[in-house]
């Protein structure tokens, strides 16, 4: 199929006035960024929509790229012609000549006159274009309800647009239009999906990953960098904070409260993340928590863990089914990387029976008894490395010198 242009429609039509303007400008900037590798295309901005002139680039490829831009509700590959009845008919005939039309293919024309000075109404256009089309293609049979081919024609002042398809986009809010949050990124399936969901809602995210070298390997760290790289396709660039967590984590081991260790670790993660958030001006923390999935994700655990920070914790996946999360991960492209078998610092130190119902007072008492904890937390913050990841980042360039093999974990419990 040959197309001249892509027509992109914006979402959240409830937005008005200045907000709407800002919204559209942000989407425009995002689109300009994702279209950088395609220098031939030309973007035209109009109230409520955008046009991308293809100038020979592939409509299929660019549709796939652009439908992932947050704030785009739909994409239609279109043919363009002058606003003139004969030109429109001629273009319609040519457009249909590219399709296979087996005997009995159902069809209708659905015209819309947006430019009211055009001499023929929408209704008239349906007939004026439909009749010559049916004469030229006798295999077509008119059907008003759900035809196999619906040829849409939009008549505007600057041109007439012909198209068949309206391909749904990811919708949501434009990137960064709702502020910034820190995202706790593990190497699992859930947190990258939470990242995407947060970005889709207009949050700019900075990722925070805790690693416990040498108990977690260089490969585990590379996996998280790769996940960030995949996510950066949706954002252009993402900041990733890599926090060395070994000292903090091992300080929780062997004080007689092993069943509480995940709770203690999560609270320490939140404290460190809150400090990083303050530096970055982020106003919330996003996690991949999913209610009931594991011991640390019961309501009681979430409650005790959440009290370690004053920032709101956003859990976009909290009520989702695992199946839906997996499908989402496949769709956004993180699944294959997430299922690589490298260890996460949290799975390393999991006790035989982690508590599902931690007691805040007991947890606070244990924390208070760990005299070096505040100092270790400070040290972890100070030793955090921050890297900026882009879709074309070369991972080997930023990975460190650590061994690719993890040290075999001792018996902790
Ligand atoms: P995920 O698939 O995201 O790892 P999960 O179902 O395995 O989630 P947990 O391992 O209990 O659940 O982690 C819950 C959340 O805690 C994660 O979604 C993530 O936001 C955060 N988290 C866990 N481990 C780490 C880590 N090493 N670094 C940063 N965040 C982490
Ligand atoms: Mg996990």
Image: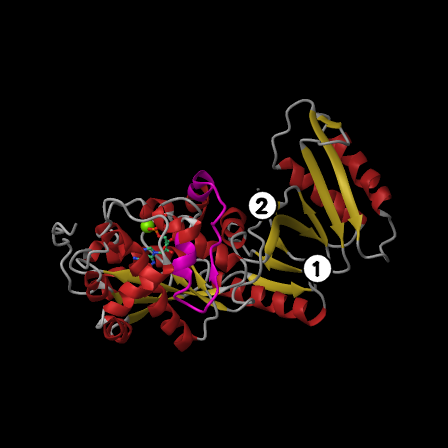
Q: Is mark 2 on a helix, strand or loop?
A: loop
Q: Where is residue 62 in the image (x, y as percent from the top left)?
A: 51, 52
Q: Name the residue under label 2.
A: 2
Q: Where is residue 206 in the image (x, y as percent from the top left)?
A: 40, 66
Q: Which residue is drawn at 70% across and 37% down?
A: 150
Mark 2 closeness class: few <14, some 14–19, many ≥20 residues within 10 Å: few
Q: Residue furthest top?
A: 103
Magenta-highlighted residues:
301-326
Q: Quick check: 102 above or below 10?
A: above
Residue placed most toward the observer, 118 or 219:
219
Q: Quick check: 76 above or below 360?
A: above
Q: Is residue 1 magenta?
A: no
Whether residue 82 is visible, yes or no, is yes
Q: Name the residue under label 1.
A: 14
Q: Residue at x 86, y 49 (%)?
A: 120
Whether residue 223 is visible, yes or no, is no
Mark 1 closeness class: few <14, some 14–19, many ≥20 residues within 10 Å: few
- Of badges 1 and 2, the one in the foreground is 1
Residue placed most toward the observer, 162 or 185:
185
């Amino acid at each position: 199929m040959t197309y001249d242009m892509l027509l992109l429609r914006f979402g959240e039509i409830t937005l008005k006035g200045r907000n709407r303007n800002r919204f559209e400008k942000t989407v425009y900037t995002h689109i300009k960024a994702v279209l950088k590798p395609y220098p031939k295309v030309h973007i035209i901005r109009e109230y409520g929509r955008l046009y991308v002139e293809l100038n020979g680039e592939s409509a299929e490829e660019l549709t796939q790229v652009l439908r992932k831009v947050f704030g785009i509700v739909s994409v239609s590959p279109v043919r363009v012609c002058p606003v003139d009845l004969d030109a429109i008919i001629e273009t319609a005939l040519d457009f249909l000549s590219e399709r296979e039309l087996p005997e009995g293919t159902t069809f209708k024309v659905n015209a819309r006159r947006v430019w009211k000075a055009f001499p023929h109404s929408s209704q008239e256009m349906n007939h004026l274009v439909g009749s010559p089309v049916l004469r030229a293609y006798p295999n077509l049979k008119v059907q008003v309800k759900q035809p196999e081919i619906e040829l849409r024609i939009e008549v505007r002042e600057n041109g007439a647009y012909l198209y068949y398809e309206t391909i749904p986009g990811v919708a949501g809010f434009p990137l960064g239009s709702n502020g910034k949050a820190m995202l706790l990124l593990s190497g699992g399936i859930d947190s990258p999906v939470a990242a995407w969901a947060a970005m889709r809602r207009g949050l700019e995210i900075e990722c925070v990953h805790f690693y416990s070298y040498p108990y977690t390997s260089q490969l585990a760290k590379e996996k998280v960098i790769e996940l960030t790289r995949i996510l950066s396709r949706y954002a252009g660039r993402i900041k990733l904070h890599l926090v060395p967590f070994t000292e903090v984590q091992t300080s929780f081991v062997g004080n007689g409260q092993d069943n509480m260790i995940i709770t203690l670790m999560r609270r320490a993660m939140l404290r460190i993340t809150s400090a990083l958030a303050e530096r970055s001006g982020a106003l919330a923390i996003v996690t991949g928590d999913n209610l009931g999935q594991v011991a640390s994700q019961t309501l009681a655990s979430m409650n005790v863990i959440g009290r370690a920070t004053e920032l709101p914790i956003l859990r976009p996946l909290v009520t989702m089914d695992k199946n839906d999360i997996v499908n989402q991960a496949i769709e956004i492209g993180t699944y294959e990387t997430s299922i690589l078998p490298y260890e996460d610092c949290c799975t390393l130190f999991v006790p035989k029976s982690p508590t599902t119902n931690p007691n805040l007072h007991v947890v606070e008492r244990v924390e208070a008894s760990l005299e070096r904890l505040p100092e270790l937390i400070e040290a972890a913050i100070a030793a955090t490395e921050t890297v900026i990841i882009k879709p074309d980042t070369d991972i080997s360039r930023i990975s460190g010198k650590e061994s690719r093999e993890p040290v075999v974990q001792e018996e902790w419990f």
